[in-house]
Every structure is written in C-alpha cells, then in structure tokens.
Image (cartoon, grey):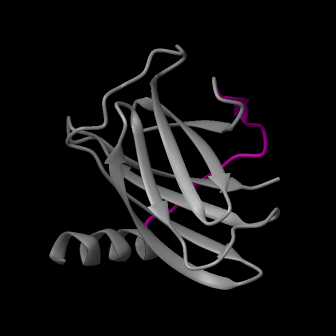
Amino acid sequence: MKSILLFVAGLMFATPVLAEDYEKGPNGGLMLDVAGIDAELLTSGNTVTINVWEAYKPTPVPTKGYSAAVLVVGANGRETLPLAPSDPNSLKGQAKNTIGPGSTITLTIKTAEGKSGQVKFKTR
C-alpha cells in the first residue's frame, strides 16, 4: 500500500514528457520512449495494457520487477490505476469506467533496474 501511495505522489509532482508524435507499437498501440525502454499503450474497454519493448527494437522486455501506475483523465473523471506485471512483457490495470477516445493517460514507470520516468499519452 505504501508503494502505491508513493507512486500516486510521483504522478502528482513529476513533470511528464509531452509528445504529439507517437511511434506505432508492434501491436498497433501508441508507443513512447521512457526510462530506457519503449512503452506501448493499448486500451480495450476499461483495461489499460502497457507492453514493454527494448528501446528502438521490437524485442519484448520481461516486466518482472517493474512497478507502474497510470492516471486516466477522461469524460468519466480522473482515476489512478496501479499496473501489475502480466504475460512476459506487459503491465495491466482495470479502470472503473470505459476509457474512451480523447482520454489522457499519464504513465509513471520504474524498471527492474531502477530507472524511472513518466510519459503522457492522448488516446485516439
């Protein structure tokens, strides 16, 4: 619980990287560089998935030892979601409401190596 509270505090005080031009991820999602890796955002209904790839390569990176959270801001308000490792290279979380187009999703992530960063996605 303490680590989740620290993550939420990090979301509030960190300055996110803003990007208008996204790379297209291997699964068709929006992708940005953060903390030495490429983070691909996929949303489906109320599920947020971040796939983790080697920087500039479509090589999956195992997410064991990663911690992450997202702040979702959209038509249904604001919600902070912790993300848990899933599959070999994914982090997933469930929102209370559907995540629609035009939502802003701010990702805060810490890698197993201790690198951390934050990026902001705007869903399409």
Q: Nearer the viewer, residue 97 or 1?
A: 97
Q: Does residue 23 sit above or below 90 in this rendering? A: above
- The majority secondary structure of the magenta stretch comes to loop
Q: Is residue 97 magenta?
A: no
Instruction: Identify the residue at image location x=39%, y=32%.
Output: 89
Instruction: Identify the residue at image location x=21%, y=38%.
Output: 112
List x then y, in percent, for residue 16.
Answer: 54, 58
Q: Does residue 41 sit above or below 6 in this rendering? A: above
List x then y, in percent, for residue 69.
Answer: 41, 62
The count of marks equals: 0
Q: Is residue 16 magenta?
A: yes
- The answer to whether residue 120 is left or right of residue 90 is right
Q: Nearer the viewer, residue 29 or 121?
A: 29
Quarter occupied by the N terminus: bottom left
- Which quadrant of the figure has residue 32? top right
The answer to whether residue 16 of the structure is visible from this angle is: no
The answer to whether residue 57 of the structure is visible from this angle is: yes
- The answer to whether residue 51 is left or right of residue 115 is right
Instruction: Identify the residue at image location x=50%, y=56%.
Output: 107
- Which quadrant of the figure has residue 113? top left
**Farthest-out residue, left:** 2
- Which quadrant of the figure has residue 44? bottom right
Q: Does residue 30 sit above or below 13 in this rendering? A: above
List x then y, in percent, for residue 36.
Answer: 40, 30
List x then y, in percent, for residue 94.
Answer: 49, 66
Extent of the magenta region: 14-25
